[in-house]
Amino acid sequence: MEPGKRHIPLLIGLTIAALVLLGKIFSLQVIDRYKEDADRNSTVYETIYPTRGIIYDRNGNILVGNKVAYDILVSPREVQAFDTVALAAVLDVTPEFIRGKLKEYRRRRSAIGFQSVTMMRMVPAETYMRFDEVKYRFPGFKGQVRGVRDYPFNAGGNLLGYVSEVNQAYIDRHPDEYRSGDYAGMTGIEAAREKELRGEKGYHIYLRNSRNQIEQPYKDGAEDKEAIPGHDIVTTIDAVLQQYGQELMQNKVGSIVAIEPSTGEILALVSSPGIDVSQLADIGRHWEEISTNPYKPMYNRAVQASYPPGSVFKLVNGLIGLQEGVLRPEMTYPCHQGYHFGAGHKLGCHAHKSPLNMEESIMMSCNAYYCYVLKNILDNRKYDNVADGMDHWREMVMSFGFGRKLGSDFPAELSGSIPSSKTYNRAYGKGRWNSTTVISLSIGQGEILATPMHLANLCATIANRGYYYIPHIVKESEGVPLDQRFKERQYTMVDTTQFPKVIKGMWRAVNSGPGMGGTAWIAHVDSLEICGKTGTAQNPRGADNSVFICFAPMDNPKIAIAAYVENGGFGATYAAPMASLMAEKYLTGSVSRPALEKRMKEADLMARVKHD
């Protein structure tokens, strides 16, 4: 071979090798890809639903668990001729029910495609087993076993919330996470912790033939995905205390909130009337009953109802007065059945001795005393005018958590309202109002609004002598971290040295014996050293609201409570007894006043509220 042509065989060999390699690549990347795509076009995915996480109370009691439920599904495109009467007999329904469902699915044929839809939910176990034995006779119909929520402890229906099938609007908001037939938490903890509780769905992949019948697992199940169970949630709730609070609030409208001051953990969050946990597992069946109830049991009054705080707010004004230097514990003010001002105006008060010092004013809940205190705060000469004094007062009030959302991990929390100078400039005109115009703020009336959660947080703040932890309802656990904000102390603008001066008056309100003038003597329990403050908040829709906050014991407090009973009258009538019973139950495990407990449980205020 000529020297110049010796490279030709080498080039031919390289060309042949390259063609073989390209052919192999084409086979792998194109032909096999098309084959795989063809396989996938003939596959069907069967969803494996994960076990939803369990919700525990702080002591390990299961508040929300799981139990097995049975559904009957149908794949409309796979349905063949079948005996409708026979299937109806198996499922214990009428033939018309089945025909109606199939007619509906045919209308939605394009949207459903090859998917399966749920025809019957939560059928009895015996019905499911009966169907399972004969399902081969009804192509296109199949059973599905899934988990539904179970509630072994009747505590906290409102705070736990419910799980329900997602609607199209929910799917549109979460297009990558949910599809028709999926379930999600809709309210309460179930909604707030949906991401942790739901787990991760898995699936089985099956091949179907040209007649759309499932034949065998795709790739022998090699590409199946196992479901990942949801994380368990440990709440801060004490189930026994929560249940006890619900019993006390039976047939009453209002709320009880209990907090552990040293952590901000919510021990009980009672809203009444509330949802019984027996209604949560199948909320759809009870929806009409719940939604048409005039007392709105879905409405969580603990965090969603804004009320005037009444006389418990005197504690805030007293602390601000001390901090601003316009009040000293030994200072006395007179009360002549109230505070008289202007041309015959009067803010009334009940009969008690006069004059009073600060401790006595808290013990006896004197209105006039705090009118003087607020006037001195707003008219303080260090401010240019009353508007400046008002805005500084507002800033200090808001440092206690009022007038804003506290930032808890519970959904739908309201902020309440604390007025500013702008509020009154709009109402009266700039420069046309003064401290007596807004004097009702001194006793927690007027334009002040707060939730029971705000009041419980106030009590925890006083118990801690000047700071609080943001109230929260979920404890840190494996896979469920606690946000750093719940671990940080939130200090008020009042120096911590001022708080013991107020606490002395709260102690005397509860522990001063009969005839001494303590408005909360009914809350007294030997050896518990409960410190409290009564409130009677005016209600434009009927009888006054009964309010009480307390913490115990006085030193190293373990619990802070706010009770708010709509149309309950004086603070000592309902709120104080119930809050003190809650404190005693939590601290001792029992109650020493069975007659009082019986009276509180049997009291029925619903008719009073209903007709107001």
Image (cartoon, grey):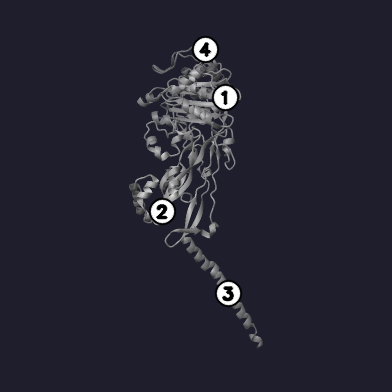
Q: For the residues carrying marks 4 and 3, which lies nearer the camera in this image?
A: 3
Q: For the residues labelled 4 and 3, say whether their Cβ atoms are less than 8 Å apart.
A: no
Nearest to N terminus: mark 3 or mark 1? 3
Query: Alpha-carbon neighbours of circle 1 within 10 Å: few (<14), some, or many (≥20)?
Result: some
Left or right of 84: which side holds 57? right
Q: CA distance from mark 2 to mark 1?
A: 62 Å
Q: CA distance from mark 4 to mark 2?
A: 83 Å
Name which residue lies at 40% across and 39% down: 285
Residue type at mark 3 is Val
Q: For the residues carrying marks 4 and 2, which lies nearer the camera in this image?
A: 2
Residue situated furthest bottom in the rendering? 2
Name which residue lies at 51% across and 65% down: 33
318 up-or-down from 285: above or below: above
Q: For the residues labelled 4 and 2, say whether their Cβ atoms are less than 8 Å apart.
A: no
Query: Alpha-carbon neighbours of circle 2 within 10 Å: few (<14), some, or many (≥20)?
Result: some
Residue 160 appears in the picture as rendered? yes
Location of mark 3 (residue): 20
Q: CA distance from mark 4 to mark 3?
A: 106 Å
Q: Position of residue 224 (x, y in %)?
A: 53, 55
Nearest to N terminus: mark 3 or mark 2? 3
Q: Position of residue 299 (x, y in %)?
A: 43, 34
Location of mark 1 (residue): 587
Q: For the residues carrying marks 2 and 1, which lies nearer the camera in this image?
A: 2
Residue type at mark 2 is Arg
